[in-house]
Amino acid sequence: MIANHRTSFSLLLLTLITASLFAIPHTKTAIAASTFSTQRRFGLSDDNTNDIAVGDVNGDGSLDLAVARQGQQSAVYLNDGAGNFAFDLRVNCTQTTVTICFGTATDQITHVALGDINGDGYLDIVAGRDGQQSTIYYAIPSPIIQ
């Protein structure tokens, strides 16, 4: 039996999440869910966010947020190192110090996963789309500007 597109993507997503859970060193003690009181917002209030994946996309040691948006520009929000992300800022693909775009504003991206697909040591983006072919966006390393 041939698995359908959604099942294949779900299995890939589960594999990448499972692999990343075992790769993250756990150095702190567990906390109760009731302690999640601090909020950090990102993006805009009218964003059509469908899915989010977490990983260090730019290699600076801080976890970034890859955001899948259906019919809007999908992007990676870069962590400033203190857990802050671009807020109240329309995604601008030329502002690469706060966001990195993937796909186009008309793509129907509904799911996103991060993983080193080609084994080069950099996280790639796997994007699942509604009514379109899914895509892997391979990372192209560039120097970190600080």
Image (cartoon, rainbow, N blue to C red):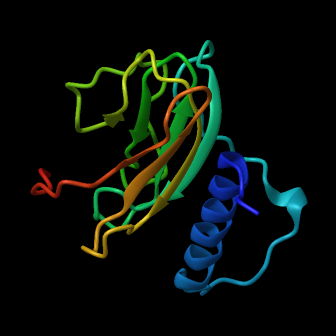
Q: Nearer the viewer, residue 67 or 117?
A: 117
Q: Nearer the viewer, residue 79 or 59?
A: 59
Quarter assignment of residue 110: top right
Query: In which quadrant of the rendered image does the N terminus lie?
Result: bottom right
Q: Tell me the residue at 60%/63% (across/down).
A: 12
Q: Tell me the residue at 68%/64% (across/down).
A: 11
**Residue 28 percent across, percent down from the top left:** 65, 83
- Relative horizontal placement of residue 34, taking residue 117 as reference (left or right): right
Please say if 77 is above or below 138. above
Quarter assignment of residue 3: bottom right
- Relative horizontal placement of residue 94, taking residue 134 as reference (left or right): left
- Relative horizontal placement of residue 140, taking residue 29 as reference (left or right): left
Q: Which residue is farthest front? A: 1
- Relative horizontal placement of residue 95, taking residue 51 as reference (left or right): left
**Residue 26 percent across, percent down from the top left:** 62, 85
Quarter assignment of residue 74: top left
Q: Tell me the residue at 29%/67% (across/down).
A: 122
**Residue 37 percent across, percent down from the top left:** 78, 48
**Residue 84 percent across, percent down from the top left:** 46, 43
Q: Nearer the viewer, residue 135 or 83?
A: 135
